[in-house]
Amino acid sequence: MRVLVTALAGHGHLFPLVTTSWALRAAGHEVLFASAGDLTALKGTGLHSYDVAPGLDMRSLLGDDAGEAFRSSTSGRQLGTDPSDMRDHPAFRLFNGLAEGMVDGLVGLARDWRPDVVVYEAMNVIGLLAADAAGAKAVSHSIGVAHNKDVLAMFAGMQRDIFKRYGVDEIPDPDVHLDVAPPSMKEAPDGWLMRYVPYNGGGQLPGWLTARPERSRITVTLGTVAPMLTGIGPVQRIVAAAEKIDAEFVIAIGGNVDTSSLSDLPDNVRLAGYVPLGPLLATSAGVVHHGGAGTTLTALDAGVPQIVVPQGADGPINAAAVAAAGTGLNVTDEELDTQLIERLLTEESLRVNAERIRAEMHAMPSPAEIADRLTKNFGGQVS
């Protein structure tokens, strides 16, 4: 089969689809990943890629509203409300603007390349138009716990005018929806369950990461977007508390983030820059993070207790789900202190529940099994 995979270029949107793409490629199918914006991260995956909107700049769609959009994109309004009420919302301008910028190139690529299947990140609903243009099957791919039917319907509704411009009056349902959320963390699965296998980028591991830490390690990360839009306030509070805690702290903040305020660090705090999160969490006893979908699921996959300090986007929803599952704590920046952080190391129920969710995730069908199921259901032949 020819499989066209499409997602926004942001790490949190494209990384969850990389393992699935490679499962399809390893099964012998021809895979092309289509996106737009800064494709640096995508180029590092080893997948063949295509830029459907050269020069598209996410920040230019928001101007000075970038931080506001991040903080309020899903948390500032009740989810599942009429999308027409969202037109003055920064999130509408962002996601609708990205869809407008990508749709002509994506549909044109689908018409030219003629995929048999289009796999699209569930918020990138224009993947349905690409499937329609090619006469292909459509597979929606969730990227986190927050992606329930109401959320996905809201993003689909935002793009209704785009569909009408292409002669599609009613946004269709995909042929298949892949749900990577642990079943116990949602009211009901939204489609085919698929295990979330973390991909956090490649790279050489530092020597200190391949050895077992001498004392308990706590990872601290704010992802790739939050530090640029909302600052590193939570990290500063953790550093202030760290010297009173018998643990090693690893601060994993990469990219073009200003970390100059993190000077004179205690001996038990390591400012590590970019480190692939999966291997780092495999050596950690706990993690403090911003609530991004990929970070949340990677921590759940590792079975480590979490403190989630939501900074925006879907962070509040993920934080609430983690707390409800008993695998972590949902707190504000101001609540971060020594006593709270120590709970990661001492609260047995957090560890037990984290291990329970990990076992649940590892029992879900793997991307390889889903690739085989898609092949059988769609009658595809190996390319």
Image (cartoon, grey):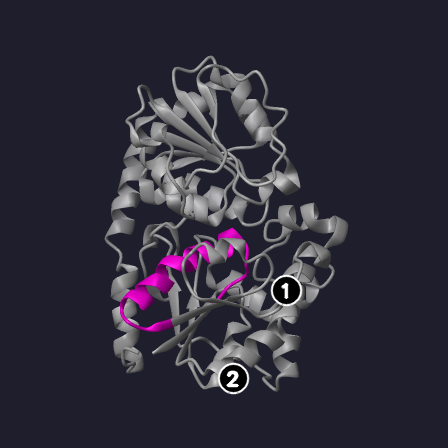
Dominant secondary-structure state across the stretch colored magenta = helix
Question: Residue 112, how many percent across, how many down?
Answer: 51, 83
The answer to whether residue 332 is left or right of residue 252 is: right
Location of the C terminus by quadrant is bottom left
Does residue 15 show up magenta in the picture?
Answer: yes
Does residue 174 show up magenta in the picture?
Answer: no
Residue segment shown in magenta: 6-30
Q: Which mark is residue 98?
A: 1
Residue of label 2: 111
Disc 1 on helix, strand or loop? helix
- The amino acid beneath tag 1 is Leu
Disc 2 on helix, strand or loop? helix
- Residue at 52% in and 84% down: 111
The answer to whether residue 88 is left or right of residue 352 is: right
Could you tell me if the residues under marks 2 and 1 are in contact, i.e. CB atoms within 8 Å? no
- The amino acid beneath tag 2 is Arg
Marked residue nearer the N-terminal end (2 or 1): 1
Question: Residue 2, how many percent across, how many down?
Answer: 38, 77
Please tell me whether residue 194 is drawn above or below residue 302 in the rendered image. Answer: below
Q: Nearer the viewer, residue 37 or 189?
A: 37
Quadrant for residue 350, please give it: top left
Quadrant for residue 236, please give it: top right
Determine if residue 285 is in view. no
